[in-house]
Amino acid sequence: QAQFVESGGGLVQAGGSLRLSCAASGSTGSMNAIGWYRQAPGKQREFVVAIVGVNTKYADAVKGRFSISRDNNKNTVYLQMNSLKPEDTAVYYCNSGCYGCPASVFRSWGQGTQVTVSS
């Protein structure tokens, strides 16, 4: 099973941008399908975006603003977030092995990276 380290979060004003990174280690065989998830305070963890091969899937809330990419040589996946909104404030996580699946299917998570968008 792969382990993930998320980074790149921070505090940004509404309309700003951030790029998150998800570095994988361990058994990365399941890295073909990988996704980003987020959990806002008081809310359940939700799907944000996923990639498998050249295919991508985005949650409606982030379409046109967020973009996922990967560097297979580095076992790293990136999340470029543009036009950020206060409602994007959450802890962001990555996970692999199930394309576009709900967060509930995963049993283990990394520590995540906090994204805070001020209005």
Image (cartoon, rainbow, N blue to C red):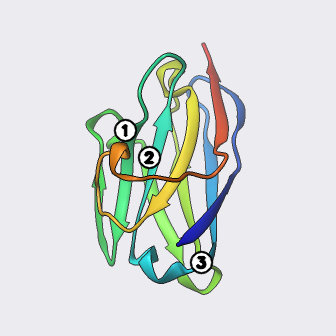
Compute the Cα span from label 3 to label 2: 20 Å
Q: Is residue 70 above or below residue 111?
A: below
Rate crowding at label 2 as few (under 14), some (14 to 19) or many (20 or more) other CA atoms within 10 Å: many
At mark 1, the secondary structure is helix
Q: The C terminus lies in which quarter of the figure?
A: top right
- Residue corresponding to mark 2: 66
Asked if marks 3 and 2 touch (Cβ < 8 Å), the reply is no
Q: Looking at numbered disc 3 in the image, what kind of residue is underneath it?
A: Asn
The x and y percentages for residue 32 are 39, 77
Rate crowding at label 1 as few (under 14), some (14 to 19) or many (20 or more) other CA atoms within 10 Å: some
Compute the Cα span from label 1 to label 2: 6 Å
Residue 62's disc number: 1
Quadrant of residue 97 in the image? Answer: bottom left
Identity of the residue furthest to the top in this view: 119
Q: Looking at numbered disc 1 in the image, what kind of residue is underneath it?
A: Val
Q: Nearer the viewer, residue 87 or 15?
A: 87
Q: Is residue 10 visible?
A: yes
Asked if marks 1 and 2 touch (Cβ < 8 Å), the reply is yes
At mark 3, the secondary structure is loop
Q: Is residue 102 above or below residue 39?
A: below
Q: Is residue 52 above or below residue 108?
A: below
Q: Is residue 64 visible?
A: no
